[in-house]
Amino acid sequence: MRDSAVFYRSFYEAIKELPSENQLEVYNAVFEYALNFNAVELTGLSKTIFTLIKPQLEANIGKYKNGIKAKNKQKRSKKEANENVNDNVNLNENVNINENINENVNEKKLFESFWNLYDKKVERSLCENKWRKLTTHEQQLIINGLPFYIRATPDIQYRKNPATYLANRVWEDEHLPTYKPAKEKSDLEKFLETGKFE
């Protein structure tokens, strides 16, 4: 259990767009997971938004756990410092290596989330290269804003290729167009156009 957790503005921006009952579910799930490490079962839109937030929560939990391990090791190493000064140097190197490994794992999880949610599977290696060049903050902004872009472009053929989406920094666009599916014509409209009643 933790006494505190980081809550990002991007979480707030994504959650505030939800209906009230979904907002409460997602807030509860975020804090239950971030503070108590307990997963909450969600469905529908609440599950979708939480799935986008979860990789960042996992990364923060990993950093928290590594920090506790490092503090415990540092306490022990202070006792041993009189015997061997090199222990602290090795400890810091190990903590840095662990943090780098965790960041790489988190980056891969975030990319997989992006790739699966974007759902237009073209030019994967190019996308992965572009993804690696982004900061963790930019990656999280993409993940949090992606549901809105997907909702605005439900027809995949009109959705930009994922590499183009990343290269053009589309997630920074303020106003996304909404493409509505063509409304089916009524029987009367069909009759007036064709002169035939089906």
Image (tube, rainbow, N blue to C red):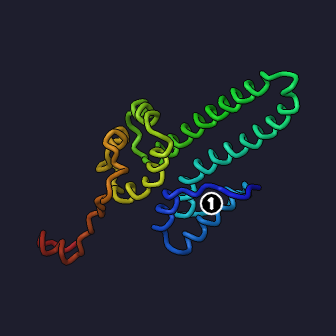
At 33% from the left and 48% from the top, the residue drawn is 170
Q: Which amino acid type is shown beneath numbered disc 1? A: Val
Q: Please state the horizontal and vertical placement of residue 66, each as a whole percent of the image.
A: 72, 40
At 13% from the left and 75% from the top, the residue drawn is 192
Q: Is residue 181 above or below residue 71?
A: below
Q: Is residue 21 above or below residue 99?
A: below
- State left or right for residue 96 relative to residue 21: right
Rendering quarter of residue 148? bottom left
Question: In front: 154, or 63?
Answer: 63
Determine crowd level at label 1: few under 14, some 14-19, many 20+ residues with C-alpha closer than 10 A: many
Question: In front: 70, or 115?
Answer: 70
Q: Please state the horizontal and vertical placement of residue 12, each as a whole percent of the image.
A: 51, 62
Indicate the quadrant containing the C terminus: top left, top right, bottom left or bottom right: bottom left
* Numbered disc 1: secondary structure: helix
Rendering quarter of residue 31? bottom right
Residue tagged 1: 30
Question: In front: 9, or 154?
Answer: 9
